[in-house]
Image (cartoon, rainbow, N blue to C red):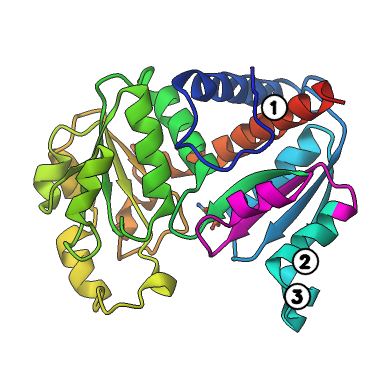
C-alpha cells in the first residue's frame, strides 16, 4: 500500500515500500509481455514531464509508462518555454499545477528541487533526478534487474565504480541496497570517491581489482563531465587506465557476476567497448525494466490520488 502524495527519493522509504514497488513492477512487466493491449492495469489522469536537464531513457520511459497505463501525457519543452525568458522554477511549477495535471515528472540540476516542488504543488511530484542528490526510479530499475538475476538482495556484494561524488544514481542505489540487505563498495579516484561516504553505509576501496573481488554485481557510472568544475578530474584516459572496467576485471568477480551501467555510457572511459556484447551485461535489461518500474510508480501515485477524491 502506497501512502505518499509524491515520489521524490529512496532515502525515506521503508523496506516494505520498496518491496511493494518491485512486486508491482514485475507484475507490470509480465502484463506488458503477455498482451500489451488487454492485460495492463489501467488508470485515468494527466501527467506532465518537466525536464530541465537532458534525458533519453528516463524521459522517454516515463512517457511510455504513462501511456501504457492510460494516462494522458504531455511534455513542457523547457527549451522553447518561458523558462528561456527567465520565468522562475516556482512560477513554472505553479503554471503547470494550475492547469490541473495530476502528476509532474521532473528532472532538475538543483538538489532538493523536487522537494520544493512537492511543497508548492497540488500535483504529485515524481523525481526523475535532482542534481547530485537522488535518482530514485533508476535505483528501482537497477534493483529490479538485480533481483531478477540474483533472486534476493541479502548478502550480495555490489561494487560501483566511478564518479560517486556527483552521482545521484550512486546515492539512491546505496540507500536502496542497504535497506534490502546488500553490501555496497564504491571505487574510483580519491577526488571522486569521498571517504566520508562510509558514514552513509558504503565501503570505500581505491583499488579496482580489490573492490571487484567476489562481487556479485559490478556497476560502472558515467563520468559526468558537465558537473566537473573543481579540477578534480583532469584526464579521461588516465581514469580509464586505472578505473575503466574491462573483461579481465571480471576474473576477480564471482563467476556469475553481472555488469550494469545506468547509461549513457562513455565507451572506452568507464567501460571497454568489448563489453557492449558481453554475455554478463544486463544494461539493455535495465532499460526495459525502467518502463515497468515507472508504470508501477505512476500507477501507485494515481491510486493514492484516486482513493482520496
Ligand atoms: N540513466 C539515465 O538517467 O539516463 P538518461 O539521462 O538518458 O535519462
Name the image quarter holding residue 178. top left
Q: Which quarter of the rendering shows the C terminus?
A: top right
Q: Is residue 263 above or below residue 22?
A: below
Name the image quarter holding residue 152. top left
The residue at the point 41 percent across, 33 percent down is 176
Residue situated furthest front in the rendering = 119
Q: Is residue 120 magenta?
A: yes
The residue at the point 62 percent across, 32 percent down is 292
Q: Which residues are magenta?
A: 98-122
- Whether the residue under disc 2 has CB within 8 Å of ligand 1: no
Give yes or no for contact between labels 3 and 2 (Cβ–Cβ under 8 Å).
yes
Residue on which the image places disc 1: 300
As drawn, the label of residue 91 is 2
Give left or right: position of 56 versus 305: left
Q: Is residue 46 above or below residue 99?
A: above
Q: Closer to the camera: disc 1 or disc 3?
A: 3
Amino acid at each position: 500500500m502506497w501512502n505518499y502524495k509524491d515520489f521524490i527519493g529512496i532515502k525515506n522509504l521503508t523496506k516494505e515500500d520498496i518491496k511493494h514497488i518491485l512486486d508491482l513492477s514485475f507484475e507490470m512487466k509480465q502484463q506488458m509481455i503477455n498482451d500489451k493491449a488487454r492485460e495492463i492495469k489501467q488508470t485515468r489522469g494527466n501527467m506532465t514531464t518537466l525536464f530541465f536537464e537532458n534525458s533519453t531513457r528516463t524521459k522517454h520511459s516515463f512517457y511510455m509508462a504513462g501511456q501504457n497505463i492510460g494516462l494522458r501525457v504531455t511534455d513542457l519543452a523547457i527549451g522553447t518555454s518561458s523558462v528561456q525568458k527567465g520565468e522562475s522554477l516556482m512560477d513554472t511549477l505553479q503554471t503547470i499545477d494550475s492547469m490541473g495535471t495530476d502528476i509532474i515528472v521532473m528532472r532538475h540540476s538543483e538538489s532538493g528541487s523536487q522537494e520544493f516542488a512537492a511543497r508548492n504543488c497540488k500535483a504529485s511530484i515524481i523525481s526523475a533526478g535532482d542534481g547530485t542528490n537522488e535518482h530514485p526510479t533508476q535505483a528501482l530499475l537497477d534493483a529490479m534487474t538485480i533481483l531478477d538475476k540474483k533472486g534476493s538482495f541479502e548478502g550480495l556484494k555490489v561494487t560501483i565504480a566511478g564518479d560517486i561524488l556527483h552521482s545521484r544514481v550512486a546515492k539512491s542505489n546505496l540507500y536502496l541496497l542497504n535497506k534490502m540487505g546488500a553490501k555496497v563498495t564504491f571505487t574510483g579516484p580519491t577526488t571522486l570517491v569521498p571517504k566520508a561516504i562510509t558514514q552513509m553505509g558504503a565501503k570505500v576501496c581505491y583499488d579496482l581489482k580489490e573492490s571487484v573481488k567476489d562481487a556479485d554485481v559490478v556497476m560502472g557510472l558515467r563520468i559526468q563531465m558537465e558537473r566537473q568544475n573543481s579540477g578534480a578530474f583532469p584526464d579521461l584516459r588516465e581514469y580509464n587506465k586505472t578505473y575503466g572496467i574491462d573483461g579481465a576485471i571480471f576474473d576477480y568477480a564471482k563467476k556469475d557476476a553481472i555488469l550494469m551501467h545506468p547509461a549513457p555510457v562513455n565507451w572506452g572511459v568507464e567501460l571497454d567497448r568489448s563489453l557492449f556484447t558481453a554475455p554478463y551485461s544486463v544494461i539493455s535489461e535495465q532499460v526495459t525494466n525502467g518502463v515497468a518500474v515507472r508504470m508501477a510508480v505512476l500507477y501507485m501515485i494515481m491510486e493514492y490520488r484516486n482513493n482520496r477524491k
